[in-house]
Amino acid sequence: MVRVAAPRSLAAVLLAACFGLAIPSGAPPARAQGEEALPQEHWSFSGPFGAFDMAAVQRGFQIYSEVCSNCHSMKQLQYRNLTAVGFTSDQVKAIAASVQVPLGVNDQGEPILGPGTPASTFRSPFPNEQAARAANNGALPPDLSVIVKAREGGPNYVYGILTGYTDPPAGVQMQPGMNYNKYFPGHQIAMPKPLSEGQITYADGTPNTLEQEAHDMVTFLTWAGSPEMVVRKQTGIRIVLFLLLMTGLTYGVKRKVWAQAH
């Protein structure tokens, strides 16, 4: 959970409550001595009036499908949720049917796999935690459903991890099976570098730089963790406007009622 500073005013509390936003502390998340400051990217969904770039969300889903889904699950999403980002019903059916998902067990108690449907949960790459650890040298790839909300620094942290792989500095002793990442706490991370320049071929012709791929992936993950964000912000704006209107009306009534008393 992201830690935030104590609110400085009632207005800050109202804005945070209405929009579902963390109250800014005026500084980026604290970093341990020797650790790199997180990159400060511009995100279309930032701020009370921000909204998701749905083209970026779709590109991010492509990256998840082609790369990240080989190790990471997203157990809180179903394929039908993809209609909210612009995929048609037929496209969703085709996406779901392209993967094999659990369909229960047969009479002998053996698991049955079959094509997914729009109601299916996103396919998990491993049947259980033990299998996941066995395939990853003991490390457990985290579920990505709410990864952006679960990490201090949010989208900037995840973006930093995706773009922060470098060769270790001279004199740094790496543990077996670990990779150097300048933004990861301690700098040694079990996950190999997941993205690289030109790795993804975008159907819409978007340049496939590492930075673009990471940006699109983080946009998708942020939507996955808060698909209702835009509606929540719109509701918050209406509430704030209503409160301002009622404040003005209340003040006007008070002045009129108490005018004769004075």
Image (tube, rainbow, N blue to C red):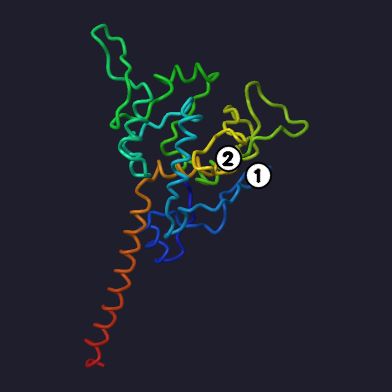
Q: Residue at x 30, y 78 (%)?
A: 248
Tell me the residue that label 1 is attached to.
Answer: 36
Between disc 2 and disc 1, the foreground one is: 2
* Observer-nearest of 217 and 91: 91
SS at mark 1?
Answer: loop
**85 versus 259 height, above or below:** above
Q: Are marks 2 and 1 in contact (CB under 8 Å)?
A: no
Across and down, in percent, residue 116 comes to 32, 25
Q: Quadrant of the N terminus?
A: top left
Q: Residue at x 26, y 78 (%)?
A: 249
| Drawn side of residue 150 relative to residue 215, left or right | left
Whole-number angstrom distance, CA of label 2 to CA of label 1:
25 Å
Across and down, in percent, residue 202 comes to 52, 38
* Residue at far top of view: 108
**236 versus 166 height, above or below:** below
Mark 1 packing: few (<14 Cα in 10 Å), some, or many (20+)?
some
SS at mark 2?
Answer: loop
User: What amino acid does circle 1 point to?
Assistant: Glu
Tell me the residue that label 2 is attached to.
Answer: 208
